[in-house]
Image (cartoon, rainbow, N blue to C red):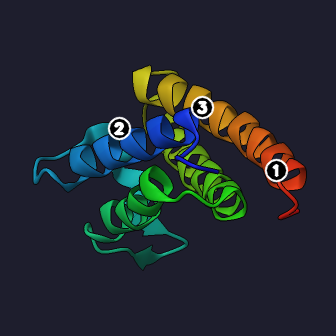
Amino acid sequence: MLRPYRTQVLLGHALLALAAYLAVPVEKASLWPLEIWGGLHIPVWVWPALLGVTGIPLARTRRARVGMLLCQLSVIWLVTVALAAYLAAGWNPVTVLCGVLALHAQWTSVDLKAVAAASGNG
């Protein structure tokens, strides 16, 4: 690919925006399940770091295969955030937005797989 796939860049930016939202040091009542998993206390910096480490290369990579893998990883992060928001507060904007972004990331991954196969990298 000569340049990053357009929807892959948008997903990378969305992950970075979500990372910035989670990094702001204010209480987010709808996302407290992200901090406690099976009795383990997850530090508050872990989720913004995971989203940032996934979002930056996703927005920049020009390799379709790498973009596909990062999109799949972003699906996992987005579904986890959506489920955490749902568990804390039921249906809310974070649940719906992250769910739709996860679906979008999945379809972008499928498109990138086709691009990789067409370019001989698949």
Q: Quadrant of residue 77?
A: bottom right
Q: Mark 2 or mark 1, which is nearer the start of the sequence?
A: 2
Tag 2 or tag 3, which sits nearer the N-term?
Answer: 2
- Residue 71 spot, x, y in % from top left: 63, 52
Which quadrant of the figure has residue 65? bottom right
34 left or right, relative to 77: left
Residue 23: give its label.
Answer: none
Q: Earlier in the sequence, mark 3 or mark 1?
A: 3
Q: Which residue lies at the image location 81% right of the left edge and 42% below the top edge?
A: 110
Q: Residue at x 82, y 53 (%)?
A: 119
- Whether residue 71 is visible to the viewer of this picture, yes or no, is yes
Mark 1 sits on what residue? 113
Q: Are marks 3 and 1 in contact (CB under 8 Å)?
A: no
Q: CA distance from mark 3 to mark 1?
A: 21 Å
Read off the residue under disc 2.
30
Front label number (3 vs 2): 3
Q: Amino acid at mark 3?
A: Gly
Image location of residue 85, percent across then percent down? 46, 38
Side of 34 where 27 appears, left or right? left
User: Can you give x and y, in whole percent of width and height, for residue 79 in the image?
Assistant: 61, 45
Question: Would you say the residues marked 3 and 2 are in contact, meaning their CB atoms lie under 8 Å apart?
Answer: no
Label 3 sits on residue: 99
